[in-house]
Amino acid sequence: MDKMLSKFRGAFLGGLVGDCLGAPYEVYWREVKLQTLIKMDEEIKAFQPNPDKSWMLHYTDDTEMAHVMAQSLISENKFSPRKIAKQFSKAYFNSVSERFYGGSVPAVFHQLKESNYSGDPYSPAAAQFAGQGSYGNGSGMRVFPIALFCFQDMEKLKELAACSARLTHSHQDAVNGAILQAAAVYFALESNSATTWQEIWGKLKNVCKEIEPETSNREKPYTDRLTRMYLFLTSTGSISNNEVVSKIGVDIQATEAISAAIFAFLCCLANRQPEEIGSRDLLQRTVFYAISLGGDTDTIGTMAGAIAGAFCGVESVPQHWLVACEGWNKAEELADGMHRLFVKKSKK
Ligand code: R7I
Ligand code: MG
Ligand code: MG
């Protein structure tokens, strides 16, 4: 298979399995024991998919919104904020009972609907939280298609990741988190198997210098967390989940969950994951480790899975995980559609 096609599929399918495997433990689990995940893995292996049987694992709002964004990018061959806002909203109203959206974002969809999708698509989100906008991680969980769409154009990636965030999350931390997560997927796409964690960390650090400039008086939550990641990864001895939770965080804020996902990937790339995870492939280790940290498990799982999938390619996504997950065939189709756009652009 073409290497980039494999990486595009890897991003979509890595994202999907991270969401589906993480969803059963979302938020209520402070930590997910490896034994629990290994048991789930065995149950998934025993699952026999057939056309009459529903999926064993369902995806959540994270995948739903990523797929909506990808579908629109493919049909329009550009970022159309009004159309994406409308499709986000429609997807929400169609699946409100199944997909567990964030607490505040439904108000945005209601306002968009009430305006019959005719007003400024950014204004309902901008008005949230007394004009500060939401700092939830929803901006990052669905952003990976932007990295694929903008591959080889980092300036465009920053612009579109920010715009895509602002449709629902206009707080600066949510916008910056979307840029950083999209950049991580981009750096994974351009990597090869010899790329080190230090190289990717260094590139992310440069992105942080732009989104959190030293001259700014604001706090620098992503820069600070990248520094803590470096200290973890250059330390000797094991890295405990408790320390990661306390120094990086795993909760619903963009600053925590997005940093945790990036850390889960870098930590596994450095081969510094907890010993019990064993010697699985990088993508499997990353998804297991991301979920085992607890907190917002589907969201950290999906973001870490998309980065690892873009790095490793689709061959790394275990087939038994894939066929147990709702929507894997749709995810593959969307990856192929985005890859066709990439090939077309590269020929110009
Ligand atoms: O960020 P968002 O789309 O939620 C995504 C999460 C993921 O875990 C998904 O898997 C799904 O389960 O939900 O949704 P938002 O509603 O924008 O943000 C989530 C929550 O963060 C809100 O309900 C608030 O509790 C909190 N929050 C804030 N609280 C105070 N002040 C977000 N922004 C603020 C704020 O500015
Ligand atoms: Mg979710
Ligand atoms: Mg979540």
Image (cartoon, rainbow, N blue to C red):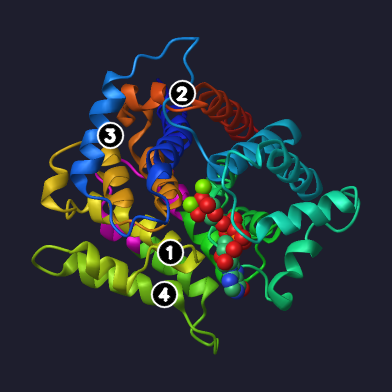
Residue type pointed to by label 3: Met
> Who is closer to the viewer here, 72 or 169?
169
Residue type pointed to by label 4: Thr
Q: Which residues are magenta?
A: 184-201
Structural distance between the alpha carbons of marks 4 and 1: 18 Å
Residue type pointed to by label 1: Asp
Quarter of the image containing the N terminus? top left
Residue topped by disc 1: 251
Q: Does the residue at mark 4 contact the one at mark 1 (Cβ under 8 Å)?
A: no
Residue topped by disc 2: 55
> Who is closer to the viewer here, 316 or 35?
35
Q: Residue at x 53, y 88 (%)?
A: 215
Left/right placement of residue 49 relative to residue 68 reads left
Residue 313 among magenta residues: no
Which x, y percent locates residue 173? 55, 71
Residue topped by disc 3: 40
- Tell me the mark number nearer the camera, choosing from 4 and 3: 3
